[in-house]
Amino acid sequence: MRSPRDRMLAFWMLMPSVLMIAIFVYFFIFRAVQTSLTDWGASGAPPPLIPNVEKKFVGGQMYEALFTDLLDFPFRNAMTNTFFFTVFFVGGCLLFGLLLALLLDQNVKGEGLFRTVFLFPMSLSFVVTGTIWRWMLQPGGGINILPQTLFGAEPLTFRWMNSRDVILPFEWANVPNYLTLIGFAIVAFYAANLFMKGRMRAAQYGIAAAVVMLAVVLSGVWQYIWPPLDNPAMEPSIAPKGFNLALVGIIIAAVWQMSGYTMAMFMAGIRGIPDELREAARVDGCSEIGIYRYIILPQLNPIMLSAMIVLGHISLKIFDLVFAMAGPDNAQTIVPGIMVYTKGFRENQFAKASAIAVIMLVTVGVIIVPYLWSQLRTTKR
């Protein structure tokens, strides 16, 4: 049992860290939220950097403008780019990381060398990675002239970060319905999984949540919640929403750098599975493919979830890789982190930059908070 002296000592040891976190994390988050509710820098009069500048409280006008104003269409493009970047980046890292881990698990010769080679990109910063891949993806050189150099064939003509081609187009007004349907699919799958495991009570809650989500879509409630665009007819022509192919090069560079990280996580999980389980499965007549399908892969699910959370957090706040590869002024590859920089440090629109930063924080929190809650609940059990 800890004595009062030990508790007091622990308190004073932790106090400096608690104070630093309170000041440099939560206080500045509060200040960003506070600034986003003002008009600081929204107009040139008065100049936003003069001493004792007046900041008028405007409530959620900055947030409304970001989601509805025609002039703020770059932000909506940035959110779209972030979504597609996250999907392909996380999926690519998990796929290649798992594939590399499974290959290394075959007791290949020189495993240590291969593991080091695959992990090496992770030791680089995103700025270095972006610089390297920017050279490789130059429209008139690098990868584009590789077929000509090796085989004498015609060089590629893909424009990489300068491409304006958009696939998987959609309308911004339909985003709430898409998100709700995705949530419905996730909850329905979770409920079905619980039902198959015999956890009827938990499955009933999942089914009820899925029904509520489906009812939200079918009833059209979102049209009263999601702010409509100021000029919905004009925006698709100046800024079509969808997967811009200019992101392909950035996704390739990001997957190249982080696949080694997911490989290391999967390797640790595979090596943590007792060999007795494999031997028992072989005795029962299970093939090697069956061992991976029924024994190894199911036990890697917690690791896969952790990797998805970490990679999702990286992708949602990506800045340096995009900045190094495409620059801050490339409309096809713009992301919210770039807009915080340009709005805040170039245009001095501090309120709008703070609003974008707060939206990024909320987006990351939507992913991180449920994960932390589930982990803490599991630890208490």
Image (cartoon, grey):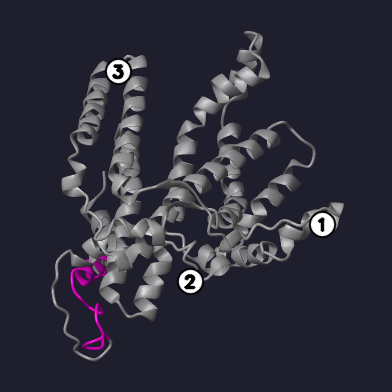
Query: Which element carries disc 3, helix, strand or loop?
Result: loop
Dot 2 corresponds to which residue? 328
Q: Tag 2: residue type?
A: Pro
Quarter of the figure with residue 377: top left
Q: Nearer the viewer, residue 341 or 305?
A: 341
Let me know if residue 30 is in the magenta part. yes
Contact? badges 3 and 2 (CB < 8 Å): no
Give the magenta-colored segment's residue range. Answer: 28-48
Say whether residue 190 is left or right of residue 272: left
The tag earlier along the polypeptide, 3 or 1, is: 1
Query: Which element carries disc 2, helix, strand or loop?
Result: loop
The tag earlier along the polypeptide, 3 or 2, is: 3
Contact? badges 2 and 1 (CB < 8 Å): no
Dot 3 corresponds to which residue? 199
Q: Nearer the viewer, mark 3 or mark 1?
A: 1
Q: How many marks?
A: 3
**Label 1 packing within 10 angstroms: few (<14), some (14-19), many (20+):** few
Q: Nearer the viewer, mark 3 or mark 2?
A: 2
Q: Tag 1: residue type?
A: Gln
Q: Separation of disc 3 and disc 2 at Cα?
A: 50 Å
Q: Is residue 128 visible?
A: yes
Query: Which element carries disc 1, helix, strand or loop?
Result: helix
Query: Does 155 appear above or below 345?
Result: above
Q: Nearer the viewer, residue 292 or 143?
A: 143
**Label 3 packing within 10 angstroms: few (<14), some (14-19), many (20+):** few
Q: Nearer the viewer, residue 195 or 238?
A: 238
Q: Position of residue 184 (x, y in %)?
A: 30, 32
Q: Tag 3: residue type?
A: Arg
**Residue 148 shows which numbered tag?**
1
Q: Position of residue 376 (x, y in %)?
A: 31, 40
